Each structure stands twice: as structure tokens, then as C-alpha cells.
Amino acid sequence: MNEHSAPTAANAAAPNSAAPNSADEIRASLIRAFRQSARNTTPYKHWILDDVMPLATSRAIPALPFPAPVIDDTGGKRDTHNSTRVFFSRENQDAYPVCAAVSEALQHPETVAAIKEVTDADLDGSSLRIEYAQDRDGFWLEPHTDIGPKRITFLHYLIDLPGAETLGTDIYEDDEAHSHFGASPSAFNQAMVFVPAKNTWHGFEQRAIPGIRRSLIINYVGPEWRNRQELAYPDQPV
């Protein structure tokens, strides 16, 4: 395996250790975080969540044995380097209990109902997709909206670095220039959530990353999503 390859259950070297929290505990934390979230309406509707998951779980995810890929330039898109991307797939759930527990918590009908209650997102018939992102210095994303199959975008920050609060998702105005509005709060175990629409411009302007910028990118996607191997439960919509 070269340094650019993401390990799978078959080739990861770390032992299979117990999940630090149960799926029920993670689910309770997620529901509380959504119900206590701060709702913002400018420049588009989005929510900021604190203490998203139990701290032990949020610490266990960055401890997973997936090396951060070395990428010369994303070209402003994550799908430029699809071969390096890591998902909480069924294979990785089998290998790493924390992946399974987080997936189970996010798949649970009570969690889905709480997300729908807070955001009014249409999640019926959608499927859970969880990406574990590890971004190095030089990473950037061009402004985009996530419209299409993504029914909701849930960015859970796991950034344990000096200045982590400056490394959140950039938010843009819905104008021709995509004027920069600001950046999401991004302290460890915070999250930004929005329902993709024509005005939900966001990205990441290139700036210094003094280490690895880790996050979970959680989406519920419609049945038209083609890359079924990325889904936590490919044959089980929520």
C-alpha cells in the first residue's frame, strides 16, 4: 500500500478495538445537539451544533488508522482524488466498532426524525453516507452548493489543532461573485448543518492548516446516488 492509498478492513494494521460509546449513547448526543442547535438565517439557513457526539467517540474517530492522503492540489473539488477517500462503509464498520456505532446512531429512526424536526429536510427514502476527511495544508474547495442527490449536509469538525476555530467551512453570499460571508465555527466536536439549495454556497478558501484538518462529512442522499459502496447501509434507506 502506498502513502496515497486509503486502507480498508482487509489491509488496515490496527487491531479491532471496542467502540468507546454505544450507538444509543451517540444517538442521544446527536439528538440533543440538533435540538439545542443555534439556527442562523443569513446568508442562508444553517445550524451550528455543539458537543455533537460523546467526547470519547469524537476522540476515537481521529485515532482510526487511516493515513491522511498526500494530495498536491484538489483542484477545488474532493472528487479530484476519489481513490484516497475514506467512508464508513460496511467493510470499515466491520473492522472498526466506532464506525459501526456512529453509523448505527445516524441511521436510527429517532435520529432521523430529530434532524427532520429541526431542519425540515426531506430525508424519506434517503441513504446515509459518512465520509472521514483529513485535509492537509494546501487543501481548498471552490464555492459550491451541494444541490442534487444530497438531502442534507452535516459537517462535523474533529480539528484538534491550534487555531481550529479558523478552519471552518467558508460561507458565501448568493451573488455573482460568491462574496465571502464568513466561516463556520469549527471548534472540536462542533458542526455546521444545512439543507442544500440553490443559495447554499460554501467551500474552503486556501489558508494555512498547521496539521491535519479532520472532519466527518455526513449526508443523507437520494436513491439516485450511484456510488453505493460509499453508503453505510447501501440497501437500507432511512
Image: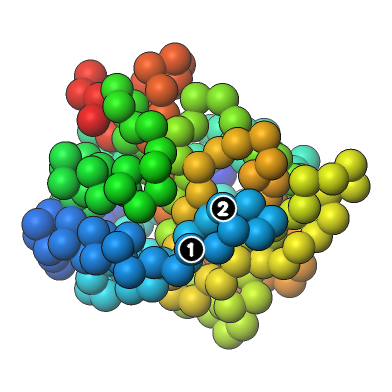
Is residue 189 rendered to the left or right of residue 4?
left
Q: Who's the residue at 75% across and 54% down the image?
A: 172
Mark 1–mark 2 CB contact (< 8 Å): yes
Q: Could you say which is closer to the camera, residue 166 or residue 17?
A: 166
Q: Residues within 10 Å of mark 2 (few under 14, many from 20)?
A: some
Q: Amino acid at mark 1?
A: Arg
Vertical order, 110 against 228 (above or below)? below
Vertical order, 27 against 188 (above or below)? above
Is residue 196 rendered to the left or right of residue 66?
right
Q: Position of residue 79 (x, y in %)?
A: 62, 33
Residue wearing tag 2: 45
Rendered-image quadrant of the C terminus? top left
When asked about the image quadrant of residue 179, the answer is: bottom right
Residue wearing tag 1: 39
| Measured Cα–Cα span from mark 1 to mark 2 | 7 Å
Q: Position of residue 133 (x, y in %)?
A: 50, 52
Q: Could you say which is closer to the camera, residue 217 or residue 37?
A: 37
Mark drawn on residue 199: none
Q: Who's the residue at 23% across and 59% down the image?
A: 31
When asked about the image quadrant of residue 93, the answer is: top left
Q: Amino acid at mark 2?
A: Lys
Can residue 33 be seen here? The reply is yes
Vertical order, 101 against 81 (above or below)? below
Q: Position of residue 38 (x, y in %)?
A: 45, 68
Earlier residue among tags 1 and 2: 1
